[in-house]
Amino acid sequence: MSTSYKLVQRKNPLKKNEPAKWYATPNSAKPLAQKVMTRVATENTTTAPIELESAMELLAAFIPQQLQQGHTVNVPGMGTFRLTFKSEGVEDINLFNSAKMIKSPRIVFTPAKELKGKTLQGLSFENGGVLESGINYASLADYRKAKGLPTPGESGGSGGGTPGGSGGQGENPLG
């Protein structure tokens, strides 16, 4: 299965004097609507989509309740949810004030080995475009064309592109 990414130029906040570098970022699609997701997830099973919807709603109500009570929540086959936070320290235990010293509570999800394995096994990556200065180019070839950059394999080209990233892309809609 192929996952799409976009190339985005960013500066390293710790090295502000260095030039920005290109980084791949996930090209996340919108999540499926709940009814569509439950219909797809229960396809070819004896579970009705409404049953999965109900189970998900129950789980969504159960997890916060358990986390607030200090429990870790293990969802078999998916992973574990836990609550964590930062805290200031004190030398004298009598001076500790939880209301003022505990900060940044957050929920941490740790995926189960099965979920990680099923998700990452055989994963490949496909260029889904370039985002530069708020302009979203549909492909690396379109970006190169718009910027007047040579494509890999052309004389004077610097290479470093992705296979299939040039040629046959049609007209550039931006110019």
Image (cartoon, helix red, strand yellow):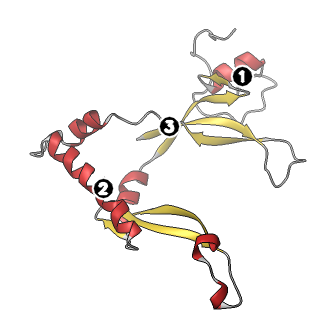
Q: Earlier in the sequence, mark 1 or mark 2?
A: 2
Q: Nearer the viewer, mark 3 or mark 2?
A: 2
Q: Which residue is mark 3?
A: 28
Instruction: Tell me the element at label 3.
Output: loop
Q: Which residue is mark 1?
A: 144
Q: Is residue 16 above or below residue 173?
A: below
- Could you classify mark 3 by the number of other residues whose Cα lies within 10 Å: few (under 14), some (14-19), or many (20 or more)? few
> How far is the residue under mark 1 from the one under mark 2?
49 Å
- Could you classify mark 1 by the number of other residues whose Cα lies within 10 Å: few (under 14), some (14-19), or many (20 or more)? some
The answer to which quarter of the image holds residue 5 is top right
Say which residue appears at 34% left-offset and 61% top-offset.
63
Q: Earlier in the sequence, mark 3 or mark 2?
A: 3
Side of 72 relative to 129 (left or right): left
Residue 29 on image: x %, y %: 46, 34
Q: Earlier in the sequence, mark 1 or mark 3?
A: 3
Q: Which residue is mark 2?
A: 61
Say which residue appears at 40% left-offset and 41% top-offset.
1
Disc 1 residue type (three-letter): Arg
Marks 1/2 in contact by CB < 8 Å: the verdict is no
